[in-house]
Image (cartoon, rainbow, N blue to C red):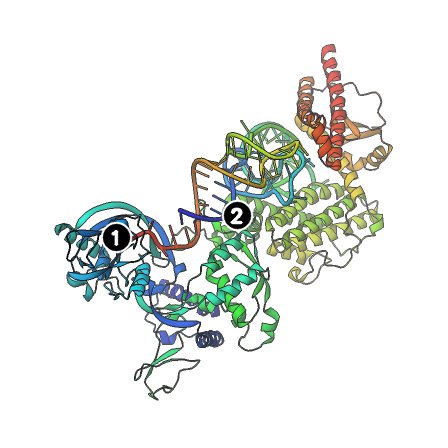
Amino acid sequence: ERVWQWRSESGSAIINQLKRLGASCDWDRERFTMDEGLSKAVRTVFVQLYREGLIYQGNYIINWCPRCRTALSDLEVEHEELDGHLYHIRYPLVGQEGPIIVATTRPETMLGDTAVAIHPEDERYKELKAVSVLLPLMNREIPIIRDDYVDMSFGTGGLKVTPAHDPNDFEIGKRHNLPEIKVIDDDGRMNENAGSFQGLDRFECRKAVVEALRQKNLLVKIEDHKHGVGHCYRCKSVVEPNLSQQWFVKVGPLAEKALEAVKTGETKIIPETWEKTYFDWMENIRDWCISRQIWWGHRIPAWTCEACGELVVAMEAPDTCPECGSRKLTQETDVLDTWFSSALWPFSTMGWPDETPLLKSFYPTAALVTGFDILFFWVARMMMMGLHFMEDVPFKDVYIHALVRDENGQKMSKSKGNVIDPLHTIDQYGTDAFRFTLAAFAAQGRDIKMSEQRVEGYRHFINKLWNAARFSFMHLTEAMPDPDAANLSLPDRWILSRLRDTVENVRSALDRYHFNDAAGALYRFVWHELCDWYLEIIKPTLYNESDPAAKRSTLGVLERVLKETLLLLHPFIPFVTEEIWEKLPGADGYIMRGEFPLNGTPDPLLNRDEAAETEMTRIMDVITGIRNIRGEMNLAPSLELKALVHSPEAAVRSSLETHRDLIINIARLKSLTVTEPGPKPESAATTVIPDATVFVPLEGILDIEKETARLEKELGKLDGELVKLTKKLSNQDYLGKAPADVVQKTKDKHAELTEKQRKIQGQLERVRALKASA
RNA sequence: GGGCGGGUAGCUCAGUUGGGAGAGCAUCGGCCUUACAAGCCGAGGGUCACAGGUUCAAGCCCUGUUCCGCCCACCA
């Protein structure tokens, strides 16, 4: 309720909602009350700015919506390129033959013309003697003025001047002391100044004026003309520039400070590209029209004395006029632009103008996360007001997130009706899946086209996490103490090292606001390292009751890894992680109150372990190699294979020996034999990994064609890579100019691939020989 | 008219300081293997929009062209 009342713009939303609920909406403004505290802040700001001369009232051309009957700020006007017409009209000279021809897209405004302007240096009008023209249809004599605003290259160089209905003409009018004749009233109808056209709607009037001109032969031609037409952001009707009295904020001095704060880096805008947009806008900012002729909103705290006309701006309604003592004072009926009060949000919601503890703690804040579409409406104005009234920036970082667009890349909006309801997506795929998707999509500087398939993919991820937790709880029936870091198995050391790396990646990504990187790192870790490898690897240990010490140690690691992973995931997957956390034996309290991993306290378990990663990677290579053979050779998973590994390295052999059971289990082997390189098995499929060759003997069932094709394919890939590497290494410039470590890396890679190539070549020859002998 | 962003696998998109082109989905082949068929294992697929330039080396830097999207603007 507070929020709704607070954002006065939402008044229309409230009414619409009530109408949908069947309520009648004959409320008057008196019944619509503002939150007292917020209202006080708004009045305080208004009064202070007024006293400093930064708020003034004046007659200006503003954007006016005839349907909503209210002024609009520049930002509330949406420009749309439309096919219109350019009407060329003859204005007969007075006291001289001939006309001046002017062009306009809005002929109905000619009824309010008070001059015709030409450029002072326009050669075409050098001989012009006449000082005025006779305004057609109105038969009013209006002066010819010279003003260098006129663009000589446009049309005939003659410009009709309508100060009451065009912002530029208004400026010209001021320079030349022209009268301002309003011909269109606030409803968009022609008023009494429009002569015989009075009462016509502005668009009907356009037709009528054109027809009248045509009959008098004053219409030269009508051209097709594309031009931007302003529309009301709320009701979409064409906006009319209109002369009226409004309240303005003089933003110059405020904008200067707001500009400076970003230039000096006191407030950073992320991604940086938006800073340029911010600068452009702040440097060209115009005074801000803050009065609105609607009833919902903060009423402007200004009173006019009916007796003497004195204007009083004050916190509370004055009893008497300070000038003449009259008691007849009427309050301004206009209310403030919703963004005026929104601009005060960082401090008005904290109890300002009182020096509350809340205000002390939360001003300024660390970061504001928002969409670019609100950068000017809100962010820039919070900056201006914050710097002015709090003398400090309201926030240190402004993170501009991506905007979710529809499948056509269009911005979603209620009025366009292309909104994808998040609740619908949530119903279908779950809140966590939806949230994770948004994080995964949130690459910087780019908008998001919502893709249901991506959401579905991440729903699978949530499900995977849930199942991994279920598996863990089958074994984790009680809280486990942290295991001895010095006495861990290789897979334990490996997963902890990978976890450590993931924590660092996630932390760094979050620090840089790269949410997609953080989500991606977690996705890979959970699915492809934790689930695909670690959980599979530890199954024998968990099911085997003969070594309780090893089981306890592994369970301890599992619990820690799961716990840390949940903590990392929680900001992305709040609900499911909380649910799992609750079931985790070793955790108490809510996960949302847990500490994010690596919070400064040293942790003996959470360390990078390069040796473990290298060793584990080799074991995984062996397994993947065997799986590849099985897959490519179309061997049924149920077929139990034998495997031989040849390696010249004692350390490699010893490592593989130690983890023989692991490999046998994961690769679904009958046996694994590790030896020094020696006689090769007769009929076998082969895979080559660094420092070792894996043979899968397939006595009697080796498909020679398939194995030949498999090896040839592998060789083809190698050849391609080797050609590139060889070319590089034979380039003297490369050897001379590239950094030594890069060259060394290339050499190592070349050596490794050459060796691999040699081995595969040898194996290919053996297979071919086998074929020949068969 | 000005400014900004983008064109990378069939689709949606990553690619941080220039040195091995990636993910998810989709596709193809094989699997109900004791957490998960919303799953597991394996595989195929790209002249990084186009044309130049800088560099030993360009998806990445520079110039131009082209297509798409967005924002801003008072040329009547």
Quadrant housing residue A400: bottom right
Question: Could you tell me if residue A502 is visible in this image?
Answer: yes
Q: What residue appears at the point 40 percent right and 82 percent down from the top-left corner?
A: A317
Instruction: Please state which amino acid type lies under the numbered disc 1.
Output: Gly
Instruction: Please state which amino acid type lies under the numbered disc 2.
Output: Arg
Residue closest to the far front: A127
Q: Which residue is mark 1?
A: A158
Is A282 left or right of A80, judged from the image as shown?
right
Q: Quadrant of the C terminus of chain A?
A: top right
Element type where label 1 sits in the image: loop
Element type where label 2 sits in the image: loop
Q: Chain of mark 1?
A: A
In this view of the protein, which residue sits in the foreground, A159 or A402? A159
* x, y percent for residue A638: 70, 30
Q: What residue appears at the point 26 percent right and 64 percent down from the top-left corner?
A: A187
Q: What residue appears at the point 74 percent right and 59 percent down from the top-left corner?
A: A600
Quadrant housing residue A692: top right
Which numbered disc flags the more N-terminal residue, 2 or 1? Answer: 1
Q: Which residue is mark 2?
A: A446
Quadrant housing residue A143: bottom left
* x, y percent for residue A35: 46, 74
Instruction: Report the Cα–Cα distance between label 2 and label 1.
Output: 45 Å
